[in-house]
Amino acid sequence: MSTPLLAALLLVLPLGALAGGAGGFTPLDRQQAAALMQPAQYREPTLIALWSSECAYCQQNLQVLARLQRQHPEVRIITLAVEAPGPELTRLYQRSGLRGVHYAYTDPVPESLNSAVDKNWGGELPRSYLFKQQEARGAVSGLLEVKAVEAAWGR
Amino acid sequence: MQRRHFLALMGTAPWLALPAWAHEGHEAAPTPQKGKPGRPELAAAAAFGPDGRLHAVRKEGAYLVVQTSTDLGLHWSAPLRVNAQPEAIAADGDSQPKLIVTPGGDVLVSWTKPLTKPYTGEIRLARLAAGGARFEAPITVHQDRAEITHRFQNMICDAQGRVLVVWIDKRDLEAARLRKQPYAGAALYMAVSENGGRSFLPERKLADNSCECCRIALARHPDGRIGVFWRQIFDGERDHALLFIAPDGRVSPIQRATQDHWKLEACPHHGPALTVSTAGELHATWFTQKDGSARVFAGVLDGAGGPPKVQRPMGQSAQVQADLVASDVGVALVWKEFDGERTRLRAQLNPHADAPATLELDSTHGASDQPRALVLAGKPYAFWHLAEGGLRVYPLCAV
């Protein structure tokens, strides 16, 4: 290993460890966010929910998702906060009682998330994407209704 | 170590980079600072004064600062603090400080001061008298002091020199909650100053059931009226409404000005823009979802309650931020959009003419504010605040 590379790693390693522990949120950049949206990886019913700590409707939506999770434990719920990890994000997520993987979009250019995730999404929150059997099953802006989600999954 | 491991580690690093604002404002902020963590608070505003000088306001730590340029943004004066005492200031996305210059040359700056509870705030305003060395102490524009939403303010000076401040207000929602009655969204309130912004008359309600967190557009009509254009909830559909305030203070009935029927249980946090041409045409941009796809549209409003006379989607994707202004060379439309690598600033003159030329003004890899369209001596300009590049001005026709 070259000396400059080692020096770079020494700089990055402790910070990287801190990132992984940022309130339990895993940071995503724009390439990782694009990869998260690929349907081929979702055989089982999966819901990806975009949200923000500043969005009041998103907090209601987390409650809806927690209810959906209780009713359908087989559903995989992934949340993606459109902001860097912070105490408010952690507090709101923990309060919702949701379980699952939770990511935070950390690219400093907010509008880049649109091209990474969905060009037909204009940034409105909450925004949810449904997947099943390696296919996209729809996108919903606004507060989710459990029945509408069940219908999209053919239940 | 293998290269892919190194790259994976590097992938976790960008969010740890210090945001641009961490390098600004050398004093620690003593008041709570709202906004999204890790994001620079770039929301800025600018206006030309009657002498042709350009004044711009932006956030620096717990202060707003104004800088002035006499050469169309090539050089800027040293920052002048708007608020001598530090306070919480919203300056992100549609939560924007605003700046106007009165016909007499006074500079007025308004902003939202977030309070402790989530989504609450006060509308603040400070005045720099023409030729003055420092801003006067800020005032709170409204009389209601409840710790509730008073946010997303905008302001304008009418033909008589009165200053109108309009904002999103949740006092009616809070009252309905106490009565255990439903209330959709928030309300639009206005306060008027008849002494150049030194004090304001008691506020009045303009509309019930506005959307909760979208910026409000204000524009002067050549006939002396002030146009107000905002996102409104019509039976659960978040379309846009228009009303006019006459020079005598009378408020017109509310018109439904866009009819895209976006049924949405959420607030898009993306308000419209409005300008009125010398012929009285109502040019606007607005964000909505139509036929399942979200887009920003540019168009001409009917102004009499009908659907827009012209409506066309802008840009190549949904995340476009636009502004427009009427000028002697026609309506100037400016917008930014992300192309996958860079955020690009573009403009069109007379966007509804046949095949208008698109001007490529600038681009950045970094974060940027929404662009603004300005006019000086009948000529249009774009103004853009960049995390990497600061305050920039672009002439849109031959100077």
Image: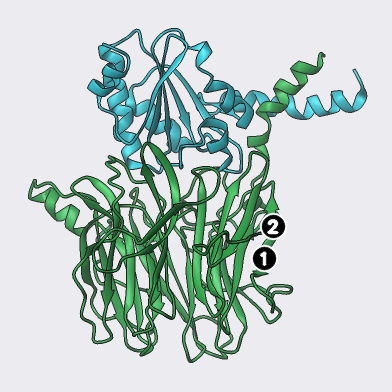
Chain colours: A cyan, B green
Instruction: Say if B6 sits above or below B115 in the image.
Output: above
* Residue pictured at 32% horizontal, 88% vertical: B194
Crowd around label 1: few <14 · some 14–19 · many ≥20 (10 Å): some
The residue identified by callout 2 is B362
Visible in this render: residue B124?
A: yes
Of the 4 image quadrants, the one containing the N terminus of chain B is: top right
Determine whether A92 is above or below B272 in the image: above
Give the chain of mark 1. Answer: B
Q: Secondary structure at mark 2?
A: strand
Please, what is the three-letter code of the amino acid marked with disc 2? Asp
**Image spot of residue B284 (x, y percent):** 41, 63
The answer for how far apart the CA atoms under marks 1 and 2 are is 10 Å
Residue lying at 44% horizontally and 81% vertically, measured from the top left: B278
Residue type indicated by callout 1: Arg
Labels 1 and 2 positioned on one and the same chain: yes
Residue A24 rendering spot, x and y as whole percentages: 50, 23
Q: Are marks 1 and 2 in contact (CB under 8 Å)?
A: yes
Q: Would residue B268 appear left or right of B363 to someone viewing this image?
A: left
Query: Is residue B77 visible to the viewer in this orientation of the structure?
Result: no
B372 or A134: which is nearer to us? A134
Q: Quadrant of residue B228?
A: bottom left
Q: Label 1, secondary structure: give it.
A: strand
Indicate whether B77 appears above or below B4.
below
Residue wearing tag 1: B392
